[in-house]
Amino acid sequence: MDTLTLIITILQLLCGLAITLAVLFQSGKNAGLSGAIGGAGDSFLARNKSKTLDAKLARATKWIGAIFLVLTLVLLILG
């Protein structure tokens, strides 16, 4: 195993750990259901949903997943 493959493998391992943590820290989709039924859907917080921690974690999950996919394809090409 050459140095480049080892570095990419370590990056992929760290990326896999990061995506696991990002998914685990997100709240479930059912967490906001009780607020939506109670009429809190039109609140100030609902309009600024893109600035919440869950939205940032969801965005990070997409980016980390894309990086993981690219690293996997690079390892496939190198192997």
Image (cartoon, grey):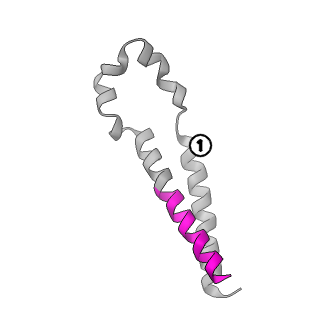
Q: Residues within 10 Å of mark 1 (few under 14, many from 20)?
A: few
Q: Quadrant of residue 30?
A: top right
Q: Is residue 47 magenta?
A: no
Residue tagged 1: 24
Residue farthest bottom in this picture: 2
User: Which of 47 and 24 lies nearest the eye of the viewer?
Assistant: 47
Q: Main secondary structure of the magenta part?
A: helix
The answer to which image quadrant residue 28 occupies is top right
Q: Left or right: where does residue 27 sit relative to residue 75?
A: left
**Rendered view: 59 above or below 7:** above
User: Looking at the image, is 16 positioned above or below residue 77?
Assistant: above
Query: Residue 24 occupies which quadrant of the picture?
Result: top right
Outermost residue on the top side: it is: 38
Numbered disc 1: secondary structure = helix
Q: From the top left corner, tell me how far across and down residue 8 is, in percent.
A: 59, 76
Judge from the rendering whether residue 12 lies leftward or rightward of residue 42; answer left or right.
Answer: right
Residue drawn at point x = 62 percent, y = 80 percent: 77
Q: Is residue 38 left or right of residue 65?
A: left
Q: Quadrant of the C terminus?
A: bottom right
Going by the image, does 48 lie left or right of 60?
left
Q: Amino acid at mark 1?
A: Leu
Examine the structure image and report whether residue 75 is included in the region drawn in magenta: yes
Residue 51: x and y in percent read: 33, 40
The residue lying at 36 percent from left, 17 percent from top is 40
Q: Which residue in the rendered view is the most extreme toward the right?
A: 1
Image position, residue 17 (x, y; %): 61, 57
Give me the residue at 58% from left, 49% from top: 21
Residue at x 34% of width, y 39% of height: 50
The span picked out in magenta is 63-79
The quarter in which the N terminus is drawn is: bottom right
Q: Is residue 25 above or below residue 67?
A: above
